[in-house]
Image (cartoon, rainbow, N blue to C red):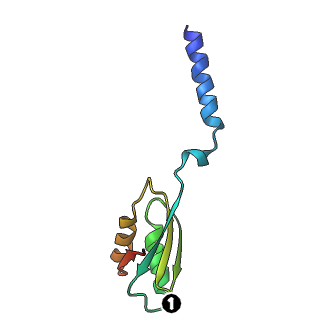
Amino acid sequence: MEQMIYSIRKLLVAALLALPLATLAATPKTVTLTVQNMTCPLCPVTVKKSLERVPGVSAVKVDFDKKTASVTYDADKVQPGVLTKATTNAGYPSAIQK
C-alpha cells in the first residue's frame, strides 16, 4: 500500500513538473492610466520607474505626448488602485482611463 501511495505521489510530482509555468501564472492584464503633471521630457522616466517598482508589474510604457501610461501587470499580485497610488506618490496623480 505504501509503495502504491509513493508511486502516485511520484506520478503527480512528475505531472506538475511537466506543466509549463505559464499555465500556472495568471494571464497578465493591461491598464492605461491618464497621468497629470508631466511637463518635461524627464517626467515619463519618473512615472515609469515608480510603476516598475510595484510588485507584479511586468511592463510599463509612458507616452509623454498623450500623458498616459500603459501598464501590464499580474492581477493576482497587484490591483490598479496600487498603480495610481504609485504614480501619485511620485508626484504624478493618475487615474484609470476608461
> Position of 89 compared to 24: left or right?
left
Mark 1 crowdedness (10 Å alpha carbons): few <14, some 14-19, many ≥20: few
Which residue extends farthest front? 98
30 over 92 or under it: above or below: above
Tag 1 secondary structure: loop
Q: In what quadrant of the picture does the C terminus appear?
A: bottom left
Residue 36 spot, x, y in % from top left: 38, 84
> Position of 41 compared to 83: left or right?
right
- Quarter of the view holding residue 75: bottom left
Q: Label 1: which residue?
A: 41
Residue in view at x 48 percent, y 57 percent: 74
Residue 53 spot, x, y in % from top left: 45, 66
> Position of 57 compared to 8: left or right?
left
Q: How many labels does the image show?
A: 1
Q: In what quadrant of the picture does the N terminus appear?
A: top right
Residue in view at x 51 percent, y 79 percent: 62
Q: Which amino acid does label 1 sit on?
A: Pro
Residue 68 spot, x, y in % from top left: 47, 80
34 over 75 or under it: above or below: below
66 over 6 or under it: above or below: below
Which residue extends farthest right? 18
- Quarter of the view holding residue 84: bottom left
Residue 51 spot, x, y in % from top left: 45, 70
Q: Could you say which is closer to the camera, residue 39 or residue 66?
A: 66
Q: Could you say which is closer to the camera, residue 95 or residue 46?
A: 95
> Position of 51 compared to 90: left or right?
right
Residue in view at x 54 percent, y 49 percent: 25
10 over 49 or under it: above or below: above
